Image (tube, rainbow, N blue to C red):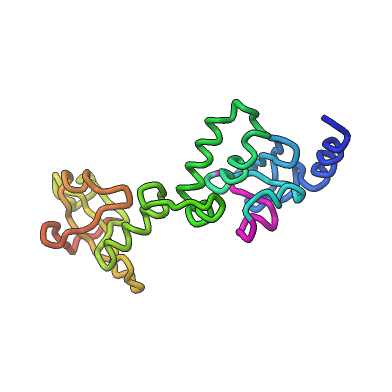
Amino acid sequence: MNKNMNKDVERDQNIIKEGDMSPWSGIDNVEMLCVGVYSVSTASHGGVWVAPYLRELLPQDTEFSEQGWYEEDCAAAIPLAIFATRIYGYSGKNVLEQSMNVWRDYFPNLYERWFDAVINTKESVVRSHEEFFEINKMKYIATAAWGSWAEGVPEGMVGVHAVRSGDKGTESTYWFVSTERYAKRGRFGYVIDASIDQQTDWRPLV
């Protein structure tokens, strides 16, 4: 590590260290992935922090860019993709691919701007989710379900709580759905078919 890199690391250590606060809670552990990029963990969550002198290499005008915090579930994919070679060298091909997939899945608009690309619905979880709710706008979509183990749910049926998609009043309804039909629900939930499923006065015991 050259002198300039040493200075960067020393400077970073004065900015981010164990015991400091992160967006999630107090920092328990800090691990340097490469100079300027750090993995941070807390008791409840974690993510990646990027030092100010590297942030200009990342997409700007995002909710992350000003403070440099990228939470671990999704947003961390952005710096991990851009700095994959710095962090992992040429052995980071798999990490790069995985990070690009997560970025495309959850931040499709940002991905398109950064890479001047066009993402179709099937290439992004967020885009697929948006399409699902647009297609099923004003239809009842399940938000919770109880099997026949729950009191009052008939054998072979599922008790379902559903609200109307796009309805600001979020009217609550309950339905009995056959276990066979419910098992075939899509990725984003079960859509009630009022011509087949049975609306009911049944309510789950609290």
Q: Point out residue 15 in the picture as x, y percentages from the top left corner.
A: 80, 48
Q: Point out residue 54 in the picture as x, y percentages from the top left corner.
A: 73, 47
In the image, residue 194 sits, relative to residue 149, either above or below, namely below
**The C terminus appears in which quarter of the rendering?**
bottom left
- Figure disc tally: 0
Q: Tell me what residue is drawn at x 14 percent, y 44 percent.
A: 156
- Residue nearest the observer in this picture, 106 or 200: 106
Residue reaching furthest front?
Answer: 116
Q: Is residue 14 left or right of residue 21?
A: right
- Residue nearest the observer in this picture, 43 or 10: 10
Q: Tell me what residue is drawn at x 32 percent, y 71 percent.
A: 167
Residue reaching furthest top?
Answer: 91
Q: Is residue 25 left or right of residue 205?
A: right
Q: Point out residue 158 in the picture as x, y percentages from the top left corner.
A: 20, 49
Q: Which residues are magenta?
A: 60-72
In the image, residue 21 sits, relative to residue 6, either above or below, namely below
Q: Quadrant of residue 196?
A: bottom left
In the image, residue 187 sits, relative to residue 175, either above or below, namely above
Q: Tell me what residue is drawn at x 70 percent, y 38 percent.
A: 29
**The N terminus appears in which quarter of the rendering?**
top right
Q: Point out residue 155 in the picture as x, y percentages from the top left corner.
A: 14, 45
Residue reaching furthest bottom?
Answer: 169
Q: Tell me what residue is drawn at x 51 percent, y 47 percent.
A: 103
Main SS of the magenta segment? loop
- Residue 65 colored in magenta in the image: yes
- Residue 175 colored in magenta in the image: no
